Amino acid sequence: MDARKSNPAIEERKHSILTKGEQNQQLKCNTDSVAGCVSQRACVYCGARVVLNPITDAVHLVHGPIGCASYTWDIRGSLTSGADLFRFSFSTDLQEMDVIFGGEGKLTRAIDDLVEKYHPPLIFVYSTCIVGVIGDDLEAVCKAAAQKHGIEVIPVQSSGFIGSKSAGYKAACDALLRLIQVPQGEEIQKGNAINYLGEFNLAGELWIIKNYLQRVGIKLNVALTGDSSYKNLKKATKAYLNIVQCAGSMNYIASQMKELYDIPYLNISFIGIEDTSESIRKIARTFQDLEMMRRTEELIQAETAAILPQIAYYRSKLQGKKAAIYVGGGFKAISLIKQFGELGIDVVMVGTQTGRQEEYDTINNLVSKGTVIMDDTNPSELERFIMEKEADLLVGGVKERPLAYKMGIAFIDHNHDRKHPLSGYVGAVNFAREVYATVCSPVWKYREQGGEP
């Protein structure tokens, strides 16, 4: 059955939804959200803050209403091995009079106060919706502050009205490109270390992958931006290779670094056993070192053998269950489909906020006939397809959690709010354990006995 036929409310989005095996159309993606539709996408400022906030010794100053500053470290969970200034959230707290007369003076005073109190090497100033409306000149204010204090003060052009979360990713990448640019005339000394892009060190995931790389003989230059610092980011142009985990947020800067600094890049994923193993192999192959490849296969064999009994146990409990996926980027969705396959779980619905056409093509090839695939969805569509496909579980982020619980189905947080690692081999076990705990929880029998979910 084509679920859309019975729901005229989503007719306007018919090209953004397809059911494998029932339509030959190409999925419409990478477009603006439908006007009036409550999209699950995050805003431009959110996209920029996701990327930049893990820079540990920077001041992150939000130029806008106080509400935007509620987006803080404690709902992202990036860990640090050094400075912890990034855990604070600063705001200019724009009020009605600032909207009328402008907020540039207030922003200047806020920067002065922060420099005097915290002495940061770097300040990011985020533009918000209201700043885009009143037209404060962030570029001029930041330039003057940088000259006054002798530090880098970088504007992040993330006003909400300029697009979606993807536009925020680009705004953050533009800010990073300004930060890492090499002074004119300076020669770049390349090394053998690699940069890790699109990794934000949630629950220490960066350190898990760094350990794998070190064991096969690969050095990490700098991560963009998990557990990174002003000083380390300044070394980014010296890398031999960029590996990109979160393609949605970092493919743009990876392509720019290839063009500007001749650094090639690979898309990788450390989600699930299959993608973790293949990603380590892909990275090691670029060094064309037989001894490194031998160590790589040893690591994969040892790590896989150590966790397979646990994965087999959870698979025996979860075989035949049905999962729905709604995450930010297409690359993560692809890895999750494979990971659910490792657990014997069928994916019956999959969607993303910012997936690209080639990623949706891959998703279409991976899923079974009848699976619903959608781009930039909304709560109404999520609810409808989860019910029609009888999913046992929804994987998503903070905005999808209440929907799942209100529907009475299990939920896995695969966004930035969780406090445990889901990357690498240890992450594969954590994920399997969490899926088992929520899907097989005895609480669901009370839902069935109690009536309406």
Image (cartoon, grey):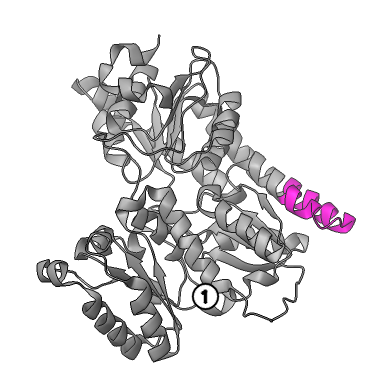
Q: Is residue 380 left or right of residue 367?
A: left
Please name the amino acid that badge 1 sits on.
Ser
Rendered position, 49 above or below 61: above
For the point 34% across and 63% down, the residue is 74
Q: What kind of element bears circle 1?
A: loop
Is 248 part of what is drawn in magenta? no
Q: Which residue is the site of mark 1?
A: 229
The C terminus lies in which quarter of the figure? top left
Q: Which residues are magenta?
A: 280-301
Residue at left offset 24%, top offset 33%: 406
- Quadrant in which residue 184 is drawn: bottom right
- Counting the numbered discs, the total is 1
Query: Measured from the top left, where is residue 186 in percent x and y?
Result: 69, 81
Image: 15 above or below 98: above
From this viewpoint, which residue is outermost toward the right? 290
Q: With 324 as the anchor, is 331 left or right in this view?
A: right
- Residue 341 can be seen in this image: no
- Image quarter of residue 14: top left
Residue 47, given in percent of the width and then of the height, sits at: 40, 54
Q: Looking at the image, can residue 383 be seen?
A: yes
Q: Quadrant of the N terminus?
A: top left
Using residue 314 as the reference point, say whether residue 413 is left or right of it.
Answer: left
